[in-house]
């Protein structure tokens, strides 16, 4: 039974949550970052990254009295995501093949998370990365409204942008 990982030792009062991190903005510390190959390479990666190389990032979030662990993948061929994470961590974009993602370890970032329904159950997923300036969380940016798709919605949007009053009757202006 000693090999089952059970311990009678006190864990130092650190509570690890068994639930899923709620969706929203959180401060997270990067606790691990390393190059790995994905076992099953997604089809959309095959053209540019057939070996499945990625930086596997482990983040720790302390929220609502619990400690949550969140995992994020940064595929080798997604330069835009490397730029975002480097900006959030305050590090330089990798320039050489021998670059190590360990420069991210220990850095605090802000992340926006959502819940993803994985086949093993719900998981927290990192949607956006932000630089953490310390202190309080930065207020979330107001959500932009989706683009108008119907003609009526486009007309209404143009009316609001022009500052015109609402139409009071059904006069057809033609």
Image: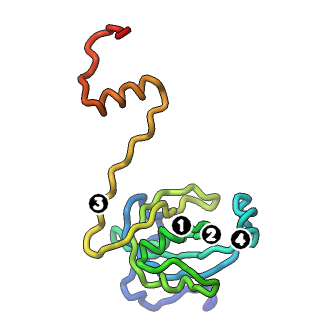
* SS under mark 2: strand
Residue nearest the viewer, comparing 174 with 134: 174
According to the picture, the residue beneath numbered tag 2 turns out to be 75
The answer to which quarter of the image holds residue 107 is: bottom left
Evaluate if marks 1 and 2 touch, with contact meaning CB atoms under 8 Å apart: yes
**Quick one: label 4 or label 2, which is nearer the N terminus?**
4
What residue do we see at 43% from left, 84% from top?
Answer: 106
* SS under mark 1: helix
Percent x, y of residue 164:
25, 25
Q: Is residue 125 left or right of residue 108?
A: right
Q: Nearer the viewer, mark 4 or mark 1?
A: 1
- Vertical position of residue 98 compared to residue 71: above or below: below
* SS under mark 3: loop
According to the picture, the residue beneath numbered tag 1 turns out to be 81
Could you classify mark 3 by the number of other residues whose Cα lies within 10 Å: few (under 14), some (14-19), or many (20 or more)? few
**Quick one: label 1 or label 2, which is nearer the N terminus?**
2
According to the picture, the residue beneath numbered tag 4 turns out to be 52
Evaluate if marks 3 and 2 touch, with contact meaning CB atoms under 8 Å apart: no
**Quick one: label 3 or label 4, which is nearer the N terminus?**
4
According to the picture, the residue beneath numbered tag 3 turns out to be 139
Q: Is residue 65 left or right of residue 42?
A: left
């Amino acid at each position: 039974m000693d090999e089952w990982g059970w311990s009678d030792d006190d864990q130092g009062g650190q509570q690890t949550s068994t639930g899923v991190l709620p969706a929203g903005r959180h401060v997270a510390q990067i606790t691990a970052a390393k190059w790995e190959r994905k076992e099953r390479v997604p089809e959309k990666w095959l053209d540019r990254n057939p070996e499945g190389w990625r930086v596997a990032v482990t983040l720790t979030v302390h929220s609502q009295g619990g400690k949550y662990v969140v995992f994020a993948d940064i595929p080798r061929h997604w330069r835009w995501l490397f730029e975002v994470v480097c900006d959030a961590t305050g590090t330089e974009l990798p320039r050489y093949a021998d670059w190590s993602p360990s420069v991210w370890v220990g850095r605090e970032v802000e992340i926006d998370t959502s819940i993803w329904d994985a086949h093993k159950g719900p998981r927290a997923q990192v949607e956006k990365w932000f630089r953490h300036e310390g202190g309080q969380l930065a207020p979330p940016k107001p959500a932009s409204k989706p683009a108008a798709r119907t003609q009526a919605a486009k007309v209404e949007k143009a009316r609001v942008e022009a500052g015109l009053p609402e139409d009071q009757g059904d006069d057809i202006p033609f």
